[in-house]
Amino acid sequence: MDRVLIIGGGSGIGLALADRLLAAGTEVTIAGRSADRLAAAASRLGRSDLLRTAPLDIRAEDDVMRLLAATEPWQHIAVTAADATGATAPLGELDSGVVRELLNTKVLGPWLVAKHAHLTVDGSITFTGGISAYRPVAGTSMTAAVNGAIEALARALALELAPVRVNAVSPGWTDTPIWNAIAADARQERLDAMAARLPVRRIGQPSDVADAFLAVMRNPHVTGTVLHVDGGQRLV
């Protein structure tokens, strides 16, 4: 893997994936909305000879076009960007503006990336789904919907963009900064309780999910597939 773009690479799963790739000697560009987060990520990752950062609002088509058109073809693109702030709430309390932002970031944004991506013929795009598409609970109607939609999009694009491969990785409960928005006041308590319910008896780590991204990127015979990294959560 010579050149990889990670959209949402400033934190969580994307940051862990960047770390894995840099350790393997891959040239990596991490992109995201927050310049401060990108700078902090770059400082943490090091390897300045292999690492690039790029400002990008995945919701804005002009931004996506600018980044993807201004470079040589990518071999792989991973989209890990997500914003769940306010997205978990009872249906009657769920703000429509929050829903639109969730759709823009988690579905329409990745679609824009696929639309404008310039990839090598043996390249791939990998999206991020989520467990709520399979095990929704009350208050997760829209997170379930967008996670189901991104997996359907991956299957359709695997046909349309062939031979470029398109896949999705579906994490279960994972210890990422997104929990600061979902359960800021009781974050660790929530994570510990969830870990006790899983067959593996622990919450996923960003590195666990990063390894799944690497698996689908590196296997040239995998496309239109969803790889689950949920500690058995779909079974309980």
Image (spheres, rainbow, N blue to C red):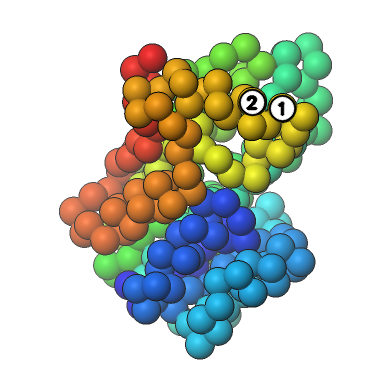
Disc 1 on helix, strand or loop? helix
Q: Position of residue 90 (x, y in %)?
A: 73, 14
Q: How many circles with numbers are drawn on the protein?
A: 2
Kindly give the residue lying farthest to the bottom in the view shown.
49
Q: Residues within 10 Å of mark 2 (few under 14, many from 20)?
A: few
The residue located at (78%, 12%) in the rendering is 92
Amino acid on which the number 2 mark rests in the picture: Glu
Q: Position of residue 39 (x, y in %)?
A: 70, 72
In the rendered image, is residue 127 in sight? no
Q: Position of residue 137 (x, y in %)?
A: 57, 14
In the rendered image, is residue 213 in sight? yes
Residue under label 2? 189
Is 67 located above or below residue 107 in the figure? Answer: below
Disc 2 on helix, strand or loop? helix
The answer to which quarter of the image holds residue 176 is top right
Tell me how far mark 1 sits from mark 2, CA to CA: 5 Å
Amino acid on which the number 1 mark rests in the picture: Ala
Is 60 located above or below residue 159 in the figure? Answer: below
Which is nearer the eye, 22 or 217?
22
For the N terminus, which image quadrant? bottom left
